[in-house]
Amino acid sequence: GENRVSDFRCYKSHHQLSQLGVHPNDPDSSLIYVLRDPRDIAISAANYFPFDRFPKLAALFRRLRRGEKLYRHTFYPLLVRHNYRLERMTDALLHGSAAVHNWVRVSWCDHWRPYQEAGVPIVRYEDSLAAPEDQAIRILRSLGIERTPEQIATAVRNQSFERKKEALLRSGDTGRAKFLRVGKSGQWREKLPPHLQRLLLEELGAELAEWGYSA
C-alpha cells in the first residue's frame, strides 16, 4: 500500500497482542481484530504453511538450482499429503504449535481472547463477507471516522476479493493471485474430514457458540 495517498497507515498482522508493542488505548493507534471460524482457518492454513515431514530431503532440494520450486510443486504434495497437513493444523489451532509457525504458537482461543479482554473491537470475517458495508460502518465508528455511503461502497467494491484477484491475474502476478485462494466461508463442511470436524466441535463447542458459529 505504499503507493496509496491517505491520512492513515494500516498494518495487517497475525501476531499475538503481547507481540505487537501497541497498547489498545493508545490515542495514536487503533486495533481491529478479525476473527475467523477455526475450521476454515485449518483449511486455509494447511495450504499456506509448509509442513516438511522430511526436512533433510527438503534441504537437499534447496541446495539445487531451482530445487526449491521442484520440491514445493512436485514432491511436496506427494510426500506431505493434505490430510496430514490438516491434522497438524487442527492440532495447532487447539493447542498452539511454534513448529508450524510463530503465528500459531498459541491456540486459536489464546490468540483472540487477550484482544477481547483488552476491549479491542472484534469483527467476524464471515460478517465482512456477508455484509461488507455494514461492517465497514461499524469499524469506522469505532475509529471515530466519518465517510459517506458512496465512499464506503466504492472502497468495498475496489477492495473486493474477486476484483483484487482479477487485477493480479491481469498484471501477470500469478503468484500473489494464487495466494488469494477463494475468500469464502464454510468450506470446512466439505473439505475438513469428519473426524476433525468432530474434534474441533468437541474441544471448541462453547467458543464456537459464543461467536455464533454453527455446528
Image: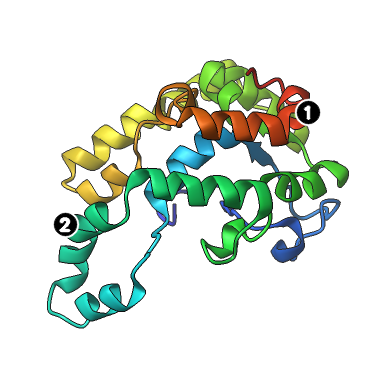
Vertical arrangement, residue 4 with respect to residue 97, above or below: above
Name the image colouring: rainbow
Neighbour tally class for label 1: few under 14, some 14-19, many 20 plus, Cα within 10 Å: few
On-image quarter of the C terminus: top right
Q: Position of residue 106 (x, y in %)?
A: 68, 57
**52 relative position to 67: left or right:** right
Q: Position of residue 53 (x, y in %)?
A: 37, 65
Between the residue at mark 1 and the residue at mark 2, the CA separation in whole angstroms equals 41 Å
Neighbour tally class for label 2: few under 14, some 14-19, many 20 plus, Cα within 10 Å: few
Question: Looking at the image, how many numbered discs can be counted on the residues?
Answer: 2
Q: Helix, strand or loop at disc 1?
A: helix
Which residue in the structure is indicated by mark 2? Answer: 74
Vertical arrangement, residue 143 with respect to residue 103, above or below: above
Front in this rendered view, residue 28 or 131: 131
Front in this rendered view, residue 171 or 17: 17
Residue at coordinates 83% horizontally, 55% vertically from top-left? 26
**101 relative position to 166: left or right:** right
Name the image quarter holding residue 158. Answer: top left
Give the residue type that dot 2 points to: Thr
State whether residue 140 appears in this view.
Answer: no
CB within 8 Å, label 1 to label 2: no
Which residue in the structure is indicated by mark 1? Answer: 206
Q: Earlier in the sequence, mark 1 or mark 2?
A: 2
Name the image quarter holding residue 98. Answer: bottom right
Q: Position of residue 124 (x, y in %)?
A: 64, 29
Q: Helix, strand or loop at disc 2?
A: helix
Give the residue type that dot 1 points to: Ala
Residue at coordinates 17% horizontally, 38% vertically from top-left? 170
